[in-house]
Image: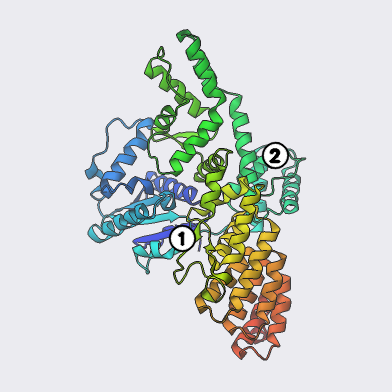
């Protein structure tokens, strides 16, 4: 199903789930633009779209109030001369039409309680005013227990990454738009550069593809960064270097020179310290501080206003600093990071600076002292031998956690913590696999250890079946040569049930290495320890992988 088909399917409510940078917000804005264009062209209006960040509902306002408040802030810079009243969104936009509320970024609300409150607001609106609203909710993956709050019947669409062909077309179009000489040749060099450093899969989201295209165009003769954190580091440096050419904050600082030496000195100090202040702002925002960026910056102890400078001029100077940072953009009367992942990256930079690293190590040592049925399971569903405490990843957003790991990669204690996750329990191994999928730079010895642990958990017949399925699924996510070998072995292990052998291990291997999976499926087709239905399915899937038509479809 195409994205447009999903959004126009007519369901009262649907959710669109995608990885960081997969284009969820861009999809909503594109849909908004397209629908408004159709309305301008005179199309019949059955739905009128309105965009709303999910965070606008976090404080519990009524939906109509939140829509009016946000729309007023958003449109005022574009000439809205009179605020929209709450009643504007409490009735139909046109006779017979409904509001299509595009609720963006549910995952960006940092606490679970806040997200559940938002989902309850949506559910209430659909119950009490179903004739007025239809909803599309976007989010990164969240626990089923949260999204099911809307009802298990609600359609959930997964936003798919670029295919290799999509990435090639995207890169070719991007390089052509930059008017580079021979964009087709540059595209091939770019794709080869991705493969050399092993980030071809990582580049299959629109945001990451855009970033690595720019990095390659900037330094075509240098290797691309090999991890997600390293890509963000170089890209942030590139943005800030380009912005430095314009330096609006320096022009504003010169205007303060008339207020004396102290004002001049303080302004220069703030400009020099701007990267660190941006990291501090990101930390505050990720910790739930909803004050404006200007207010957060002004409250920093190193940003005190000199007595001689009027408050209005000082705030104008600080606003110029925010605008000149290169990674913030004006939005609805405030400044926001270019993307949620930039906020997470700079917050992680703050957490891994030398004076904070000890505290960061402490929360990375998140320990599970009580083991609920679905979490922290070691072999046999018990803590590891000797009764020592099982370690697991801290309950922080995986994207932010990945940046922390990338930035603290060379710290020996952090690597030791990752090894504990990889060898202690299922939860820790799943966290390692999730980070590998994100593109975090995890040491090979850690991923190999996690693979061995997951294979052992899959074989452990004292573990509940759904947790054994979790283990083999994490092994597929983990990928790599060690995981490939273990998946091959698990598929041939007649002690395992047929479902795990075929659907989880064999077809999981096909996601990593199609050629090896085809060989495995050929072996399973001949394996008389496997149920006949599964042997037939092995034949069908092998034909599909090798582009052969199954015999039953040949006349």
Q: Quadrant of residue 78?
A: top left
Q: Position of residue 139 (x, y in %)?
A: 45, 55
- 405 and 205: which is toward the camera: 405
* Left or right position of 11 against 231: left
Q: CA distance from mark 2 to mark 1?
A: 35 Å
How is colour applied across the structure in the image? rainbow
Q: Position of residue 142 (x, y in %)?
A: 45, 59
* Left or right position of 445 against 268: right
* Left or right position of 25 against 166: left
User: Image point 58% across, 84% down: which residue?
Assistant: 497
Q: Position of residue 173 (x, y in %)?
A: 64, 45
Q: Give the crowd class for mark 2: few <14, some 14-19, many >=20 residues within 10 Å.
A: some
Q: Quadrant of residue 373?
A: bottom left
| Nearest to N terminus: mark 2 or mark 1 | 1
User: Image point 50% across, 78% down: which residue?
Assistant: 464
Q: Position of residue 49 (x, y in %)?
A: 36, 49
Q: Give the crowd class for mark 1: few <14, some 14-19, many >=20 residues within 10 Å.
A: few
User: Image point 74% across, 40% down: which residue?
Assistant: 220
User: Image point 57% across, 74% down: which residue?
Assistant: 379
Residue 45: image tag? none
Q: Which residue is mark 1?
A: 5
Kindly tell me whether residue 94 is visible in this rendering.
no
> Where is 509 relative to 13, above or below?
below
- For label 1, the SS is helix
> Where is 244 relative to 201, above or below?
above
> Where is 358 relative to 307, above or below?
below
Q: Which residue is mark 2?
A: 217
Kindly tell me whether residue 304 is visible in this rendering.
yes
What residue occupies the far front of the structure in this picture? 386
> Where is 427 relative to 196, above or below?
below
- For label 2, the SS is helix
């Amino acid at each position: 199903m195409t994205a447009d088909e999903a959004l126009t399917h007519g369901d009262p409510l649907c959710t669109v789930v995608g990885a960081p940078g997969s284009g969820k917000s861009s999809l909503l804005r594109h849909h908004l633009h397209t629908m408004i264009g159709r309305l301008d062209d005179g199309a019949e209006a059955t739905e009128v779209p309105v965009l709303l960040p999910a965070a606008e509902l976090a404080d519990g306002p009524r939906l109509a109030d939140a829509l009016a408040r946000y729309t007023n802030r958003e449109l005022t810079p574009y000439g809205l001369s009179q605020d929209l009243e709450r009643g504007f969104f409490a009735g139909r936009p046109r006779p017979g039409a409904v509001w299509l509320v595009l609720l963006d970024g549910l995952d960006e609300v940092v606490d679970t309680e806040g997200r559940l409150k938002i989902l309850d607001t949506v559910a209430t609106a659909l119950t009490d005013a179903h004739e007025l609203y239809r909803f599309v909710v976007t989010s990164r993956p969240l626990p089923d227990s949260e999204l099911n709050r809307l009802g298990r019947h609600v359609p959930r669409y997964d936003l798919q990454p670029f295919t290799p062909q999509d990435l090639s077309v995207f890169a070719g179009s991007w390089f052509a738009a930059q008017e580079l000489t021979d964009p087709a040749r540059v595209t091939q060099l770019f794709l080869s550069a991705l493969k050399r450093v092993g980030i071809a899969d990582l580049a299959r989201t629109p945001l990451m593809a855009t970033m690595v295209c720019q990095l390659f165009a900037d330094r075509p003769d240098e290797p691309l960064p090999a991890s997600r954190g390293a890509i963000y580091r170089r890209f942030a440096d590139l943005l800030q270097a380009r912005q430095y050419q314009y330096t609006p904050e320096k022009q504003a600082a010169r205007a303060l020179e008339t207020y004396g030496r102290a004002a001049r000195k303080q302004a220069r100090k703030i400009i020099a310290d701007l990267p660190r202040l941006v990291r501090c702002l990101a930390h505050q925002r990720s910790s739930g501080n909803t004050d404006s960026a200007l207010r957060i910056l002004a409250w920093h102890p190193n940003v005190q206003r000199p007595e001689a400078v009027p408050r209005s001029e000082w705030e104008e100077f600080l606003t110029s600093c925010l605008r000149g940072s290169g990674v913030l953009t004006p939005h609805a009367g405030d400044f926001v990071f270019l993307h949620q992942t930039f906020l997470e990256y700079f917050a992680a930079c703050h957490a891994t600076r030398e004076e904070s690293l000890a505290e960061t190590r402490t929360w990375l040592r998140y320990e599970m002292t009580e083991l609920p049925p679905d979490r922290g399971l070691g072999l046999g569903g018990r803590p590891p031998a000797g009764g020592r405490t099982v370690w697991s990843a801290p309950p922080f957003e995986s994207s932010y956690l990945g940046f922390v790991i990338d930035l603290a990669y060379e710290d020996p204690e952090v690597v030791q913590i990752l090894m504990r996750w990889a060898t202690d329990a299922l939860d820790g191994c799943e966290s390692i696999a999730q980070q590998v999928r994100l593109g975090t730079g995890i040491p090979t010895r850690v991923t190999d250890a996690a693979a061995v642990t997951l294979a052992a958990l899959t074989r452990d017949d004292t573990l509940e079946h759904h947790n054994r399925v979790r283990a083999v699924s994490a092994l597929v996510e983990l990928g790599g040569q060690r995981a490939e070998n273990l998946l091959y072995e698990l598929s041939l292990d007649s002690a395992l049930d047929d479902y795990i052998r075929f659907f989880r291990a064999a077809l999981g291997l096909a996601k990593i290495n199609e050629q090896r999976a085809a060989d495995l499926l050929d072996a399973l087709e001949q394996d008389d320890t496997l149920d006949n239905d599964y042997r037939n399915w092995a034949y069908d899937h092998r034909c599909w992988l090798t582009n052969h038509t199954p015999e039953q479809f040949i006349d």
